[in-house]
Image: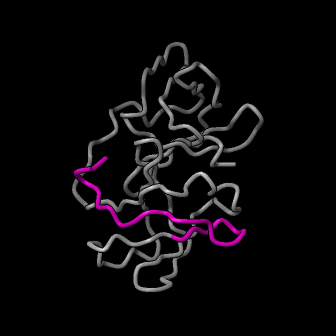
Amino acid sequence: MTYEKHILIGRIKKIHGYQGSVTATRNRSFTDDLPEEGWVFIEIDGKLVPFFIAGMEYSGADLIRLKFDGYDSAEKVSGLTGCNIFLDSGRPEKRIPDGLENLKGIKVLTREKQSVGVIKEVIIGPGQWLLSIISDDNKEILIPLHEDLIIQLDQEKGILIMDLPDGLTEVNF
């Protein structure tokens, strides 16, 4: 899959160690350095999911070791092996439709009507808005707030139905 406003920077090849780091191969056409702290987008099930870079180290001409904020174990990043990594090209992106920033207390369901949890807050970050959701077992889950993931919003019933990539909610734990 290709993305107009995103630049392919590489692919995650393997997990590095037990602390949630991954090793990625750099795309030969991408010659710039990644920002020390910033966002990258990882393609999961055909959708771009934002990840905040918590640490980075170049280990060779085409290898990058990345650590993502909130991912502190090999189990949390195990599903990312083989995924493409993209960088935002800096072009303006579509705005989130008005009213979606006031979603606190809305219950989030999957396409299959399974409960994900209740929205605690909307986090406005560089390049992507995130939903901070408290799951039914009281754990925080971060989900990208993107119009391509939204199937239906019924504010009267307090329900948001989303088409989430497989494994996205488990990656957060």
**Residue placed most toward the observer, 141 or 114:** 114
Q: Position of residue 46 (x, y in %)?
A: 40, 42
Residue 114 falls in image quadrant: top right
Q: How many labels does the image show?
A: 0
Residue 91 lies left or right of residue 36; in this view the side is left
Q: Where is residue 124 in the image (x, y as percent from the top left)?
A: 44, 50
Residue 144 lies left or right of residue 117; in this view the side is left
* Above or below for 115 versus 44: above
Residue located at (56% from left, 20% from top): 112
Q: Position of residue 138 (x, y in %)?
A: 76, 38
Residue located at (48% from left, 19% from top): 155
Residue 109 falls in image quadrant: top right
Work out which residue is located at the far bottom of the displayed protein and give it: 60
For the stretch drawn in magenta, the main secondary structure is strand
Residue 3, magenta (yes or no) = yes
Residue located at (42% from left, 23% from top): 151
Residue 20, magenta (yes or no) = yes
The residues colored magenta run 1-23
Colour mapping used in the image? one colour
